[in-house]
Amino acid sequence: MSVDKTRIENAVREILEAIGEDVSREGLKDTPARVARMYEEITSGSGEDASAQINKVFEECGSELVIERDISFSSTCEHHLMPFFGKVHIAYIPSDKVAGLSKLARVVDVCSKRLQLQERLGAQIADAIYDALDPMGVLVVIEAEHTCMTARGVKKAGSKTVTYATRGQFPEEYVSRVIPR
């Protein structure tokens, strides 16, 4: 997906003027261009197929459970265009193939670089892994801090939102292995 940086720059100038700022002052002169580059970066996953990131798989029948914890991410909430960030924990039960370890983190990167909701982010990660690996089951747990709650509105610093997404069969007794203590 292509970002129209000129339109973003114009819109940012308009916002700055609307809040009473002088867009020609030293600290703001380059702000519209910086914001346009930022939006290009933070939406770079839009239109990308996250499951295509799992492009290195290995035939393996011996693993009962694969867990990757504490994958850092940041994303942008589509409701307020403010960041949310935290950790993603992924577990899957392989059928007959496993992913190269870095590939799961790449899936997280692609899915998080879109305007998002945390619930949708978990679902997209789970779907990508399920589609690419055809495992018996997938569990994605996300723990995130939303700046729309911590820096504005109710201002509850340190509060975290935890979401779960599962696909296939994922036994309840495995869930406690995935969530860090």
Image (tube, grey):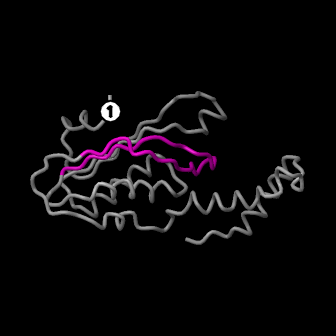
Vertical side of 28 occupied by 144: above or below: above
Report helix, strand or loop for mark 1: loop
Image label count: 1
- 150 left or right of 27? left
Q: Residues within 10 Å of mark 1 (few under 14, many from 20)?
A: few
- Residue 20 rendering spot, x and y as whole percentages: 88, 47
73 above or below 115?
A: above
Residue occupying the far left of the picture = 62
Along the horizontal axis of the image, is 171 left or right of 14? left
Residue 170 position within the rendered picture, expressed as x and y whole percent measured from the top left: 21, 45
Of 175 and 87, the residue lying toward us: 87
Instruction: Residue at 14%, 57% (x, y): give it.
Output: 95
The rendered magenta stretch, by its main secondary structure, is classed as strand
122 is higher (above) or lower (below) than 30:
above
- The quadrant the C terminus occupies is top left
Residue 54 sits in quarter:
bottom left
Q: Residue at x 47, y 40 (%)?
A: 86
**Residue 90 part of the magenta segment:** yes
Q: In the picture provided, is 122 more to the left or to the right than 83?
A: left
Residue 146's x, y, as percent? Answer: 55, 39
Q: Amino acid at mark 1?
A: Pro
| Residue 18 located within the stretch drawn in magenta | no
Which quadrant: the N terminus? bottom right
Residue 61 picture location, percent across and down: 10, 56
Image point (89%, 56%), residue name: 24
8 vs 180, left or right, is right
Q: Which residue is mark 1?
A: 180
Magenta residues (range): 67-93
